[in-house]
Amino acid sequence: MRYQLTLRIVAVLIPTVTVAAAPRPVVLEATTMADWRSAKLDGTGCYWSPRRGGPIHFVAAGNTAMTKVGGRIVILKPRRDAKPLFPFTHDAWRADDLTMRVVDTARIRAMGYETVTTDAVLIVTHRNVTIRLRGSMICGS
């Protein structure tokens, strides 16, 4: 009995330390044609996929881009430091606490009548956590 009492007293005296969970990187989700149309992104522009012929995670046309995070469509606008990516779009985007930059290698992997596919890295920063995603950028109309 005396031993149990001692343990309880010691347990009360030990400070409790709580550690905040580290911020988690954002996870981009596959988008659909219905998503692009709801964002009014039909026409000439670019889209990014983690692999050739794979799901599309980022779409940009003109001064609008979109991605999907947590089941929600996120509309992005060009950042002030954005440069031309393709004649009709930009390489740097923002929406609230989400920023994206496309680093296109300009090494052509495939070419169609109206499209070109290059290797590209998508740099995504969300709540001060940055990830780099390698994939393909397909631009055209």
Image (tube, rainbow, N blue to C red):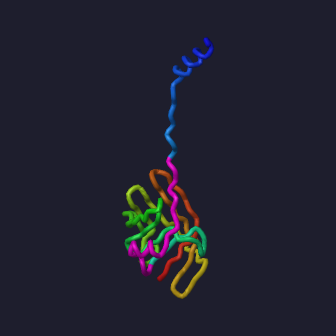
Span highlighted in magenta in the image: 23-44
Query: Looking at the rendering, which quadrant does residue 81 occupy?
Result: bottom left
Q: Depth check: 83 or 69 in front?
A: 69
Q: Quadrant of the N terminus?
A: top right
Question: Number of marks in the image?
Answer: 0
Q: Is residue 93 left or right of residue 51?
A: left
Which residue lies most toward the top here? 2
Estimate the x, y position of residue 128 in percent, counting from the top left: 46, 51
Task: Using the image, determine if residue 125 lies above or below residue 120.
Answer: above
Can residue 54 be found in the magenta stretch?
Answer: no
Task: Using the image, determine if residue 141 lies above or below residue 57.
Answer: below
Estimate the x, y position of residue 122 in percent, counting from the top left: 52, 64
Q: Residue at horizontal 47%, vertical 64%?
A: 68
Estimate the x, y position of residue 11 in percent, counting from the top left: 55, 22
Q: Is residue 73 left or right of residue 53?
A: left
Q: Depth check: 48 or 38 in front?
A: 38
Q: Residue at horizontal 59%, vertical 75%?
A: 53
Q: Main secondary structure of the magenta part?
A: loop
Q: Depth check: 135 or 82 in front?
A: 135
Q: Is residue 57 left or right of residue 52?
A: left
Q: Is residue 17 left or right of residue 98?
A: right
Estimate the x, y position of residue 124 in percent, counting from the top left: 49, 59
Can residue 31 be found in the magenta stretch?
Answer: yes
Task: Using the image, determine if residue 42 lies above or below residue 64.
Answer: below
Q: Residue at horizontal 56%, vertical 71%?
A: 55
